[in-house]
């Protein structure tokens, strides 16, 4: 006899949100500047393209120095000027399980990429790539530079690079999901 799972009284099938079809993890050093910025930008662009429910987005750092902290106030301030809210995000360190949970793990610079590739479990299902692989207008930049010790211009440069790469990434994800997902 086939037994169907019992739904809680308040749960109805038509209210169920389908599981995301794809998942993306952005990774930088401490998960307080670059990767949370990339997470916030990608979430917004996916929502604008009608893919917000189909793609799960997260971020992490290769170190745990800032675990539990909100993104750097400067990163939040610059992102907010462009319409991105990072305030609910909290830093965390990448975990071995992330290589199984996420379809795509995107490194913000070459050192992160090398670290992620070196620490990927043998049976990892995740594709590990540089985020800037998806850049269109600013193609040619190798890394998203760390703005932590620099001026306000550094946070603006991060946003420029991340927005460009996320536009290309949304187009790629839309194609993979069979959606139009056009991005301006």
Image: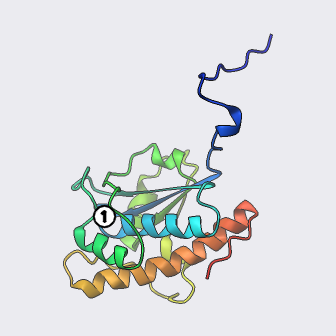
**Residue lying farthest to the front in this orientation:** 10
Residue at the spot of label 1: 29
Residue at coordinates 61% horizontally, 82% vertically from top-left?
Answer: 184
From the top left corner, tell me how far across and down residue 10 is, in percent.
Answer: 59, 27
Task: Report which quarter residue 173 is drawn in.
Answer: bottom right
The N terminus: image quadrant: top right
Element at label 1: loop
- Residue 21: x, y in percent? 65, 51
Residue sitting at the far left: 149
Residue name at image x 35 percent, y 56 percent: 89
In the image, farthest residue toward the right: 1
Relative to 69, is 171 above or below?
below
Q: Is residue 122 visible?
A: no
Residue 53, horizontal then vertical, whole percent: 61, 54
Horizontal arrangement in the rendering, residue 70 relative to residue 4 (left or right): left
Name the residue nearer the viewer: 81 or 159: 81
Against 159, residue 10 (above or below) is: above
Q: Is residue 69 visible?
A: yes
| Residue 106 drawn at (x, y percent) | 48, 64
């Amino acid at each position: 006899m086939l037994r169907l799972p019992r739904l809680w009284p308040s749960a109805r099938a038509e209210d169920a949100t389908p599981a995301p079809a794809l998942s993306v993890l952005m990774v930088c050093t401490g998960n307080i500047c670059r990767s949370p910025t990339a997470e916030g930008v990608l979430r917004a662009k996916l929502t604008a393209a009608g893919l917000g429910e189909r793609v799960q987005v997260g971020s992490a750092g290769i170190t745990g120095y800032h675990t539990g902290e909100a993104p750097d106030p400067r990163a939040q301030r610059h992102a907010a000027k462009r319409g991105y809210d990072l305030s609910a995000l909290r830093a965390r360190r990448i975990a071995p399980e992330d290589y199984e949970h996420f379809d795509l793990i995107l490194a913000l610079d070459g050192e992160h990429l090398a670290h992620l590739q070196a620490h990927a479990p043998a049976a990892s299902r995740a594709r590990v790539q540089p985020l800037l692989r998806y850049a269109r207008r600013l193609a040619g930049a190798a890394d998203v530079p760390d703005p932590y010790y620099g001026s306000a211009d550094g946070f603006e440069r991060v946003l420029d690079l991340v927005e460009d790469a996320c536009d290309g990434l949304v187009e790629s994800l839309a194609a993979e999901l069979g959606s139009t997902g056009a991005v301006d």
